[in-house]
Amino acid sequence: MNSDLPISRPESAAAIRRLALLAPLDDVAVAALDDAAGRRRLVGARSELLREGLPIHERLLILSGWAARIRLLPDGRRQVMSLLLPGELIGNCHHRNPLAVSTVMALTDVDMCPAPPAEGAPLLGDAYALSAALEEAYLLAQITRLGRLNAEERLIDLLLELMERLSMSGLVSDEGFALPLTQDILADMTGLTPVHVNRMLQLLRSQGDILLKAGQLSFDDAQGLARRIGRSPVRVAL
Amino acid sequence: MNSDLPISRPESAAAIRRLALLAPLDDVAVAALDDAAGRRRLVGARSELLREGLPIHERLLILSGWAARIRLLPDGRRQVMSLLLPGELIGNCHHRNPLAVSTVMALTDVDMCPAPPAEGAPLLGDAYALSAALEEAYLLAQITRLGRLNAEERLIDLLLELMERLSMSGLVSDEGFALPLTQDILADMTGLTPVHVNRMLQLLRSQGDILLKAGQLSFDDAQGLARRIGRSPVRVAL
DNA sequence: CGTGCGATTGAGTTGGTTCAAGGCCAGTGG
DNA sequence: CCACTGGCCTTGAACCAACTCAATCGCACG
C-alpha cells in the first residue's frame, strides 16, 4: 500500500509507510513528512532521547532504529515499559507543559526527525491519534504479559507483537525481521532475568518455534504460535 | 480546594473536585458537568460497562464507585490492567470509530454520566487531556509494578497509588479511605494469587505498615512506606 | 439454619532467580 | 599478526518467592 508515494528521502520510507497505513495521507501530509525528514537527526545507541521528569519540547518521529521507554528504580532494577519502532512517535502528548513520564533511550543508532505539526495536515493528526491509541493498546498488552503470562508465553507474545508492529512499516519479509535487542533488554522488557531469557530462547529454538540467528528472527508458524498462547492481533479502530 | 463550587448535585462532588484540580474550571465547565450529572446512570457491581472489541460510543465520567479495565485470557486467567475511580474517565479517546481495547467492569455499584463534550468548555478539554495523560502514567506505573517489584512492594505501591489518586477527588481523610476491593481483584491487579495477596496483607498488617479493616485502609506512615519502596508521586505536567 | 462468598491457614511443589564460571567474537592496539 | 579487552551469550547447581491444592473459618443474607 502506498508503495509509490512521492518521497525524496528513502530513509523515511518505513516511517511514512506506517503513518500512511494509519490514515490515508494526502500529498500535503506526505510532503510535510518528507520535508521534516530533511531535518533529521542521528543519535547513537545508548543515548537518552528523553529523561523522566523533564519537559517534553517536541513530538519526534522515529525514521529508523529502535528505542525504549525505560524506568530505573533507585536500587538499579530496570523496567522497559515499551519499545519504540520506526514510524512510531515519541512525546505524543495533547496537554500543556507535558513532562516525560519515562526515560527514552536509543537501543540502536536512531534516525529521527521532528514530527510535522498536524495543523497544516489534518490527516496527519488522525495518524497521530491512531498512533497514540495503538501505543496505549500495546501498553495494555505489556501489562497482561507481565501480569499473567509465564516466561515462555511472555517471549512468544512479545516477539509476535514486534512482528505485528514492524510489518506496519514494511520491515518484515519472508526471512523474518531484524531483532536488534540484547537478551538483557529482553529481560528488562519481560520482567525476567537475562539468564532465564536465554534459557527460554534456547527452548523456543529447540522446539522449532523460532529461528533466531545474527539478530534476525523468523517464526516457523506464527499463526500456530499465536493460537497456542491465545494471542490475537491488536485492533483499536474499525 | 474549590470547596464552594456552585454544584446542585452532591453526588458529583468528588468527580468535579478532581477535574477542577486538573484544570481551573470556569462556571461554564462546572455548569456543564453539573448538568451532565443530571443524566446520570447507576449500574450494579459486576456489570460490564464496555466490552473489549466493541465500539466506544461515548466518553463516560465516573461520579462514584470503582470500576476496572480487565482482560480475560482464553484459559480463564484474568488481568486487571487498571482501576477506574471517581472523577476518572472511561473511553477517553481522540480518534475516529474507537474500539474498546479492554473490558470495563464495575467493581462496586457505579454512578456515572456522559462526560460533557469539551467543545463548549475548552477548560474541560484541558482537564480531559490531563486525565488521559495521568491514565497513561498510571499504566506505566502498573507495568513497573508487575515487571520489577516483588509481592510486598507491589501491594504497597498499589495502595499508595490509590491513596494518591483518591485524594485528588477528596476521598481521603485522616482515617484513610474506603478500599472496596476483594483480595481476588487485588490479586488480578498485582499479578499474584489470591492466597499470596492474603499472606502479604497479613504481613503488612503485622508489620504495622497498614491498617485494613472493614474495607477501610490507612497507613501508619505513608511517606516512610513510599521511601522504603522507592516510590515517588506521579507528575505529568508542571 | 443453611448457603455462599470472601478471607484465612497449612504443607508440598515449582518456575524462575542467584551466583559463578566459561565461551564466543569483534574491535583495538602493540 | 596476535594478544587483550569488553560485550554478550551460554551453562550448571543451589535456592527461594510465589504457586497449588485443599481445608477451614466467619459472616451476611435469605
Image (cartoon, coloured by chain):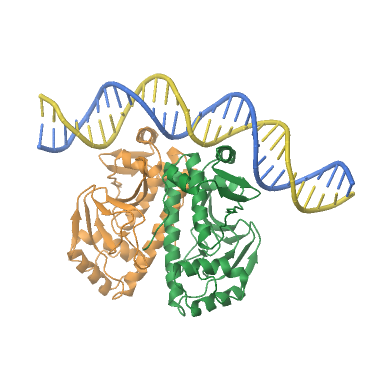
Chain colours: A green, B orange, C yellow, D blue
Residue B30 visible? The answer is yes
Residue B233 visible? The answer is no
Q: x, y (%) of residue B153?
A: 44, 41
In the picture, the quarter occupied by the C terminus of chain A is bottom left
Q: Which of A53 and B2 is in front in this view?
A: A53
Q: State how many labels appear.
A: 0
Q: Which of B200 and B94 is in front in this view?
A: B94
* In this view, B70 is above or below A66: above
* In this view, B117 is above or below C20: below
Q: x, y (%) of residue A101?
A: 48, 58
Residue plotted at (31% across, 72% down): B118
Q: x, y (%) of residue B121?
A: 30, 74
Q: Is residue A74 left or right of residue B185?
A: right
* In this view, B116 is above or below B214: below
Q: x, y (%) of residue A197?
A: 56, 41
Q: In this view, does A5 lie to the left or right of A123?
A: right
Residue A171 figure quarter = bottom right
Residue B217 figure quarter = top left
* In this view, A94 is above or below B68: below
Residue plotted at (39% across, 60% down): A236
Residue plotted at (59% across, 40% down): A198
